[in-house]
Amino acid sequence: MKWLKPLILNYLIAKEELITVTKRSKEEILEAIEEMHLLRKKVMSGEKIPCPKCGEYLIFYGKNSGKHPGIFCPNNDFEILIEYGNKFFEK
C-alpha cells in the first residue's frame, strides 16, 4: 500500500470537499499533531474549547456514549476520532 501514503500526504477529504494540502515539513506535522493532542486532552478534561472553524464549543463523546468516541463540533465543522483497543496495534 505504498501508493496510499502520497495520497494521504497530498489530499484531505472533508465532508464531500476535496482540499489540496501543501507539503509540510516534519516539524510542522509534529507541531500539528501536538496541537491536536493538547486540544483533545483539554476537551476530555471538561475544558470549554471553541471549534477552530465556527467557534461553537467542542463536545467529547467517550467510548460508552453510544456514539463514535471523539471530539466533535456541534455544527459538524470539526472532529477528532478516537480509537480504543484497536486490534491492529495490539500484540
Image: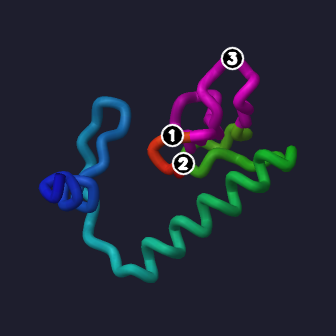
- 75 horizontally vs 38: left or right: left
- The amino acid beneath tag 1 is Lys
- Element type at mark 2: loop
Q: What range is drawn magenta here?
A: 59-85
Colour mapping used in the image: rainbow
In the image, farthest residue toward the left: 3
- Horizontal side, residue 73 vs residue 47: left or right: left
**Gap between marks 1 and 2, in whole Å?**
5 Å
In primary-sequence order, the first of circles 1 and 3 is 3
The residue sitting at 55% across, 46% down in the picture is 53
Along the viewing direction, whichever of 29 and 19 lies nearer the viewer: 29
Percent of width and height locating residue 24: 33, 74
Q: Which mark is residue 74?
A: none
Q: Which residue is mark 2?
A: 90
Q: Mark 1 to mark 3: distance in Å?
A: 20 Å
Q: Does residue 27 lie above or below 67 as drawn?
A: below
Furthest residue in direction right, as rendered: 46
In screen coordinates, is 50 left or right of 9?
Answer: right
Tell which of 71 and 2 is nearer to you.
Answer: 2
- Circles 1 and 2, Cβ within 8 Å, touching? The answer is yes
Q: Residue at x 59, y 51 (%)?
A: 52
Q: Position of residue 90 (x, y in %)?
A: 54, 48
- According to the picture, the residue beneath numbered tag 3 turns out to be 66
Question: Secondary structure under badge 1?
Answer: loop
Q: Amino acid at mark 2?
A: Glu
Label 2 and label 3: CA atoms lie apart by 23 Å
Residue 34 against residue 12 in the figure, above or below: below
- Residue type indicated by callout 3: Gly
Of label 2 and label 3, which has the lower sequence position? 3
Residue 87: mark in rendering: 1
Number of residues whose C-alpha sits closer than 10 Å to that of mark 1, classed few (under 14), some (14–19) or many (20 or more): few
Measured as percent of width and height from the top left, residue 47 is found at 85, 49
